[in-house]
Amino acid sequence: MLAVMAFALIGCSDEDAVTVDLSKRENLVAPRQVEAITYAYLPQYSHTISYQRHRQLLEYLRKATGVPLRQIFPDTFDEHIKMVERGEIDISYSNPFVYTRLAEVGATAFAGIVEPSGHPDFQGQIICRADSPDLKTIEDCRGKRWIAVDPESAGGYLFPLGLFFDNNINVSDFETVDFAPGPGGKQEKVVLAVHAGAFDIGTIRKGTLDVVAGKINLDDIRVLAQTRLYPGWVYAARKGLDPEVVQAIAHAMFALNYRREPDREILSSAGMHGIIPVQDSDYDPVRELVGKLGLDQ
Amino acid sequence: MALLLLPMVGYMSANSLVEESKMRGSSLATSLAVRAVDPILARDFLRLKNMVDEQSRVEDIVYAFVQDKSGHVMAHTFQRRFPVDLLTANGLAEDGKLHIQLLEDGSRRMYDFAVPVQVSDGQLGVVRIGLSTARINRSVQHQITLMAGLFAGALIIATSIGTYFARRVTVRLGLLRAHAEEMLTGNLNIQSSPAGGVHCWERRNCELTECPAHGETRRRCWYIAGTMCPDCDNESNFQCRLQSCRVCSVYRQNAGDEIQDLAETFDVMAVSLKTHINELRSADRSLRDQQRLMRTILDMTPDRVSLMDATMRYQACNKGFADSVGVSIAEVVGKTDFDLFYEGEAEERHMAARDILQSGRRIDTQIQIKGEGSQRWFHVVCVPVLDADGRIDGLLRTDRDISDIKGYENQLIQAQKMESLGLLAGGVAHEINTPLGIILGYSQLLQEDVDAGGQMYDDLVIIEKQTKVCKKIVADLLGFSRQTDSAKREMCFNNSVLEAVSLVRHTFKLDKVNILTEMDDRYPIIYGDPEKLKQVWINLLTNARDAMGVDGGTILIRTKLDTPAGIVSVWVADCGVGISKDKLKNIFDPFYSTKAVGQGTGLGLSVSFGIIEDHDGEIVTMSPLPEGFGFPECDGACGPGTVFEINLPLDHQSRDGSTEA
């Protein structure tokens, strides 16, 4: 009797239900995508971060140029390069090493960024755990387990690889050489892998430690060495893209001023200090490095 | 209580489960929304499909789907086509946050969770998840069943335990009630508190036998005032004393629960009640004794005592007062003077009472109350009665009958008057007697000198005769004043009487008066003056003859010797007109006479009274003749008659106290 009373009381719910007919079904067809200039960020971070970083910049460019821009998200560096080659990415934002590859398929650099440090160039870093007593110099890296960002990564692999080369250390001198797994977020994965002790050393782009500052205690990570400065990230237009469009976009980019409040927020969220005009020849030091390492074959 | 609580607790529990399920659904939807960001950005439909299919593998997830920013469904869990009603059945809340909507499709109910897919402040789309309520309901039912079982079990256990303890309590309370009923019937020798326990005098081996708690078994020591234990606080009130008991080992050992306290208090009350009742009974007995004593004293006094209140109504009286007004003592209470007395007397008493109540003055006076054929004298004392504040609250009146005293007083006055008169008369008679003797002598001498039959001789005879009358009068006066000397000697009482009878018998016969004699034949001898006694008998016989009318009558003389009493009596009775009651008391007064002027001097009986008194005797008059006197039939006048009874002592007590034979 008690249970019956309880059920009766519980049945007295004051929540109203909306009646739906689940049997009334239709085939859904995706609407056609609007024609737009595609914009892609080399997937060194996750899609979410890529979206967050460049959302305001794209919004600004749409308003400033009137050009319909749509950000797309390739999963890997190779896919990014191939999509540029196939004309699926109109505006590519990539590291200088990837740019040398894009240039080979016809893309043209038209803008470069000023790093948050205030300089238009950047460098790579060799990091290890702060409590690694046997890692004092670059020489100590010999025979160690190395994790890098990606074979296509400039700051995260090629620049440190050049540094090791200059110190007579080849890839075969390491116990293992691994690259960050999966799509996106590769710079952070390297830091976390070293932090976890899975690898003795890691190579990253300078500035990455600031990105992971909220995830780990940076005192646990020690920067063992830094590479020389190389030209920074670059905006390139695919081959055959309307030069007016490129011109309009480049003009709008160059108009951004870090000292103005709305522009400052746009540039800060994109991880830049400013955008400046560049030329293809500005990236010859990178091409030299590629040649030195024998990666151009 | 469980019946009331179960539905309420069940309702709350069900609500809690529903809220929990909503939180779970929200978590699932939010998680899916977070994970769907990358596939949406990359437009990776396969990953989205895998994600929503993962959701559908959760038991109670009915469906899951992801919409892009424009509302297009990018992936869903339905096998074939999509139920389009779902698109409009739920949406994000107005603030763009999670919204939960209860849906119903006829056969089942489900909660629809709509969660935004957000990156920073930008929205990429919406994730929707449908969570069936069937599992929630099953959980609720299971929990309710479990709770009902627990409640029922707890109820049974609680009821059993409660009944057990209630039984223990009610048995003890029932015992108390039974004892209370016994107390009402008068039995105060009951013990409600449990017997046993340790008493302070036992535990402490106390030798203070004068302590009121020593040897006490029916009351605990903390209920007894004035205990002599050095650890006890006997100065304060009961509560303060009890506070000092709480540290006492005797108290800690014997103190029980509230019911035991109640029972012990009950016993103390019974003991106190019994003591008080005994004291009351004793006081009642004493009071009754005192009342009876007071009533006896009041009732035995002949005075009429009455108590009146300030409104002049009687509050109490004694038997004398009640008898005087002719009602009972109880009936007197509440009445006024006008209810109890005749108007005149009532008015008088009322005015006196009012005067006392107003003035507060005491009344001490003598009043005369005239009744039917009688007059009574009373000595009245009337005093005000004061209350505790000194105000007059009533009055107490005492009426003492002093009629007898008044009579004695009058007699004393009369005696004094007679004594004075006797002395005067005696003196005068003595002085007159000598000239009368000379006048008589000379008148007799002159008679010898004149011729008999002449005028002179007749005049001298008249002088002689009147002079003798005067001498007789003077002699009576001297006798009244006892100026004459008595010559007492032993004499025969009967002869004295018979001599007087023989002297007058002939004369009386002329007046048709017959004298009968009934003499005691033992011839008593007395000590007396024969002449004076003979004068008394002739006086009484003459008075008896005078009481007869012209038709004459009979006089009876009877003598009687009473040897044990030492007296001899004579009765002189006639059948004449008798003497009225109001005259009886005056007949021995000098010069009092009922006879016509010239027929008597009024000194006869008073002289007789004096002679009898001189012989230490007494003379009593009764009229009419008492019944049973044995008076013979009377030929002439036949009135009520009168009898004089004279009692004389056989042994005469002389004046010097010696007894003479």
Image (cartoon, coloured by chain):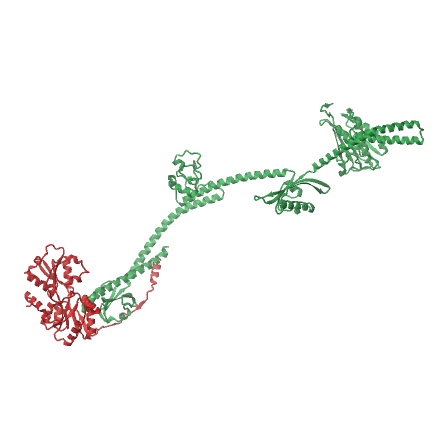
Note whether B266 is above or below B566 in the view shown.
below
Q: Nearer the viewer, residue B551 or B334?
A: B334
Q: Quadrant of the N terminus of chain B?
A: bottom left
Q: Nearer the viewer, residue B391 or B82?
A: B391
Q: Nearer the viewer, residue B126 or B403?
A: B403
Note whether B388 is above or below B557 in the view shown.
below
Q: Quadrant of the C terminus of chain B?
A: top right
Residue B424: quarter of image: top right
Q: Nearer the viewer, residue A201 or A65?
A: A65
In the picture provided, is B201 more to the left or to the right than B320? Answer: left
Residue A55: quarter of image: bottom left
Residue B109: quarter of image: bottom left
Chain letter, green in picture: B
Tell me the shade of chain A. Answer: red
In the picture provided, is B312 more to the left or to the right than A249? Answer: right
Can you give x and y, in whole percent of width and height, for residue B443 in the image? 89, 29
